[in-house]
Amino acid sequence: MELSSGSVEGGVPLNDLPEECWANVLSFTTPRDVCRLSAVSPIFKSAAESDVVWQSFLPNDLESFLSTTAPDGSLLMSSASSKKEVYFSLCDNPIIVDNGRKSFSLEKKSGKKCYMLSARDLEIPSPRLWTWNTFSDSRFADVAELNNVCVFEIRGKISTCLLSPQTLYTAYLVYNFPPTTYGFDNQPVDATMRLNEAESGPRNVRWNPQGRCRHNNGSVTVRGGVHYPKERGDGWLEMELGDFFSAEGEDGELEMRVFDDAAHWKYGFILDGIEIRPKDGRWMSNYFIYQSAKLVLVSLTHHYQELMLVHCTSTSVHSCFFGFLGLLQGIL
């Protein structure tokens, strides 16, 4: 199939279908699909600017949620020129909510909800062992910096009703090291997750990325098939704590825990928080493509009779419609 010159197989013009039809079709795909399709044809490009499309990618409760938890979010909703602007602003600029204790954003490729729990929102036993400081690279007002300690624990909790349903999520501990640090060698650290009394783990993780042990005088590469953190684009490190599935209609509590019981002194660790976002991976992309094609097929079928009532005189509309259905059925 070629979409150049605005036609589908058989020479039927795509532009015989009204723009609102294409906007409705695109609303059943994903944000990434819409951006890709908008580069294929002027018809898709025009429909991809519709508020109908981008409203479908925003959470249904977004306006009420932002009005009660985030003044900046309410300002965004009232000042944005389009739903597309709202969408990409929430993807690129997390909004601080819950009195500064959490941040809220959307995953750009899917529109799924993402949260980050600040260090203030976490349970840190023996708070006297931590110092609260400002940190320019953090989205939050302050971060927690660890003092001299042997054993420490970090816990975080979030209600699953805040998250997008039918979504596989991953939780990450977000942290960093100051210029001077010691004690975070290659000892194992336990990471566990509990959802509605069902516990996963413990997962064996290490504090330092790429198998490196940090010392005051440099670093030493270590070997072993263990979980290491990775560097983020914002200057922080993230340690993967585990995965969980947010089921439809589920209202449970997810608890995340990191426990370091290595009996030696440690110093120099900066805690930013715990981030919960949809799991990365190619298989997830394929899954979304499959689900999007199914939804588009259902949408076109349900709206076909309505469209024909309005555009009943155009024979090419029939041909275009069934040609597009055939292509979708080929995907499925």
Image (cartoon, rainbow, N blue to C red):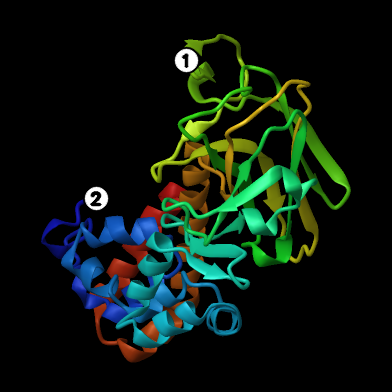
The residue shown at (22%, 56%) is 9
The residue shown at (29%, 68%) is 319
Q: Position of residue 151 (x, y in %)?
A: 77, 31
Residue closest to the far bottom: 310
Q: Position of residue 196 (x, y in %)?
A: 85, 53
Q: Amino acid at mark 2?
A: Met
Say whether disc 2 or disc 1 marks the residue closer to the N-terminus.
2
Relative side of 208 to 51, left or right? right
Q: Which mark is residue 1?
A: 2
Residue 193: name its quadrant: top right
- Res 247 seen here: yes
Q: Secondary structure at mark 1?
A: strand
Location of residue 159 with respect to 124 vertically, above or below: below
Q: Which mark is residue 219?
A: 1
The residue shown at (24%, 82%) is 314
- Res 275 seen here: no
Relative side of 17 to 187, left or right? left
Relative side of 35 to 290, left or right? left
Q: Secondary structure at mark 2?
A: loop
Q: Position of residue 35 (x, y in %)?
A: 30, 59
Q: Nearer the viewer, residue 138 or 58?
A: 138
Q: Which mark is residue 16?
A: none
* Distance in Å between CA atoms under marks 2 and 1: 54 Å
Number of labelled discs?
A: 2
Dot in front, 2 or 1: 1
Residues at marks 2 and 1 touching, judged by CB atoms closer than 8 Å: no
Location of residue 187 with respect to 179 vertically, above or below: above
Residue 62: name its quadrant: bottom right
Dot 2: few (<14), some (14–19), or many (≥20) neighbours within 10 Å?
A: few
Dot 1: few (<14), some (14–19), or many (≥20) neighbours within 10 Å?
A: few
Q: Nearer the viewer, residue 136 or 236?
A: 136
Q: Amino acid at mark 1?
A: Ser
